[in-house]
Every structure is written in C-alpha cells, then in structure tokens.
Image (cartoon, coloured by chain):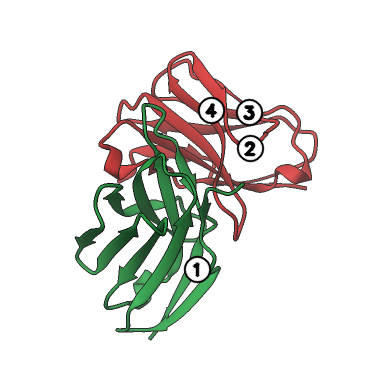
Chain colours: A red, B green
C-alpha cells in the first residue's frame, strides 16, 4: 500500500506542451524531493522542500518548477516540454527515522516527442 | 565530482550463491548509508541501512558492511534468489538537518535460476 502517490505513471507529450507531474503523500512528512533518473545513471536531485512555502533547487539544474502550498502535495511543472526532458521523475518524502531515508513514489516516465 | 560511486554497472550470479554489490564514497560527512532496490518503471524501495558508527548490519538474507577507512561499503545477499533481480542503488545521507541523500549510479543484479 503506497503512502506516496505519483500521477501519471506514464506520459507521452509533444514538444512545447506544459505539463504538471503530481505527487502526494499521506504520511504528513515535511520534507519532499524530486529526483530525475535515466537508465544506468544515478538519481539526480532537482528540487526539494522542507515544508509549506519552502522550495529549493537541487544539485542538478532543471527547467522545471515546483510548489508546496500544502504539506501533502508537491507538484512539478514543465512550462514547455522538450525531448531533453524525457526521463523518469521520482518523488520522495522523509521525516521518519534517519536510517530509513526516503519513501519513494512509483515514478512518472515522461517521453517528449 | 561524484560523491557516491558504484563502479560495477551489472552483476550476474547463480541462484543460491552470494551476491556482493559494492559502493565507494568520498565524503566523510555522511551519517547513514542505505541500499535501495528498484524494479523497472517503479520507484526505489528501501532495503537496508547502516550507521556510520557501525561496521555491519544484518537483516535476513541481506548484510551491509562498512569500511570507513577505505570509504567503502558492500551489500551481501545470501542466498540469492531470482526475485532479487533488480537495480540496486547505494545512497549516502548527509549528516545534519538537511538529510539529503546522494545516490550512486546503480548496479543491475541478475540472479539466474
């Protein structure tokens, strides 16, 4: 039973379209993260939030933006999708014991054609 | 500069044998090291972790060893099962309140029946 939900699971979209990837968690966690991952590569942190109205850019430069208006919701938006945005996007949250790290959602596989 | 490295992209072992996955790190400011397992088109799931003050942690078939002097950790799976076939990510947690996780590139494990 997932406590962090990402929609859609798969998305194929044309270049130039605006898209929003949804992420919601029911655990009441303050910390939430967005990672981008390509096959055979490490997970790259692109955005994170430590609470409502708090967002920061991650270690990997990204053209996406995020918002955190409610604790449980952390959507990621691409204003104008490009083929270079094709990737898997993973949302995660944490606030539990340090030894358990993050809880991840199932991810969104985005393909921009 | 990559702080967490998994130098073996893939590993193939026979069912019932031991699988050993390796990970190296360069930063001494990590307080926990974690292993995540990831199936295709799914998010990573937490497997096992170790505190930086320990040198071994065991959970069923999974054991993680930490060698701080060598900045090296390894995950042992004994006995390996076909269901263990997945991508395994090593991650290191920054000490302090940020608690950000830095991931390696992953190692694809294939366990042959």
Are circles 3 and 4 on residues that touch, CB within 8 Å? yes
Q: Which residue is mark 4?
A: A75
* Visible residue check, residue A110: no
* Visible residue check, residue A70: yes
* Element at label 2: loop
The label nearer to you, 2 versus 1, is 2
- The quadrant holding residue A30 is top left
Number of residues whose C-alpha sits closer than 10 Å to that of mark 3, classed few (under 14), some (14–19) or many (20 or more): some
Q: CA distance from mark 3 to mark 1?
A: 31 Å
Query: What is the chain letter for disc 1?
Result: B
Q: Which residue is mark 1?
A: B108
Are circles 3 and 1 on residues that touch, CB within 8 Å? no
Number of residues whose C-alpha sits closer than 10 Å to that of mark 2, classed few (under 14), some (14–19) or many (20 or more): few
Residue B42 located left or right of residue B35: right
Are circles 2 and 1 on residues that touch, CB within 8 Å? no
Are circles 1 and 4 on residues that touch, CB within 8 Å? no
Q: Which residue is mark 2?
A: A60
Residue at 53% from the left image edge and 48% from the top image edge: B3
Residue at 26% from the left image edge and 47% from the top image edge: B53
Q: Which residue is mark 3?
A: A77
The label nearer to you, 4 versus 2, is 2
Q: Position of residue A44 (x, y in %)?
A: 57, 43
């Amino acid at each position: 039973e997932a406590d962090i939900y990402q929609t859609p699971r798969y998305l194929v979209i044309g270049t130039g379209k605006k898209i929003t990837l949804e992420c919601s968690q029911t655990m009441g966690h303050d910390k939430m993260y967005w990672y981008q991952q390509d096959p055979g590569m490490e997970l790259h942190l692109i955005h994170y939030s430590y609470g409502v109205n708090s967002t920061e850019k991650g270690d990997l430069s990204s053209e996406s933006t995020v918002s955190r208006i409610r604790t449980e919701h952390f959507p990621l938006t691409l204003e104008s999708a490009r083929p270079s945005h094709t990737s898997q996007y993973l949302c995660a949250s944490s606030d539990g014991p340090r030894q358990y790290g993050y809880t991840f959602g199932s991810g969104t596989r985005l393909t921009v054609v | 500069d990559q702080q967490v490295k998994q130098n073996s992209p893939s590993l193939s072992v026979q069912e019932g044998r031991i699988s050993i996955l390796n990970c190296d790190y360069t930063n001494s400011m990590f307080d926990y090291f974690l292993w995540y397992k990831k199936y295709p088109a799914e998010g990573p799931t937490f497997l096992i972790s170790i505190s930086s003050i320990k040198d071994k942690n065991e959970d069923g078939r999974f054991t993680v060893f930490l060698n701080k002097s060598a900045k090296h950790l390894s995950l042992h799976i004994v006995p390996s099962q076909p269901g263990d076939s997945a991508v395994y990510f090593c991650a290191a947690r920054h000490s302090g309140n940020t608690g950000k996780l830095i991931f390696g590139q992953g190692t694809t494990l294939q366990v042959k029946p």
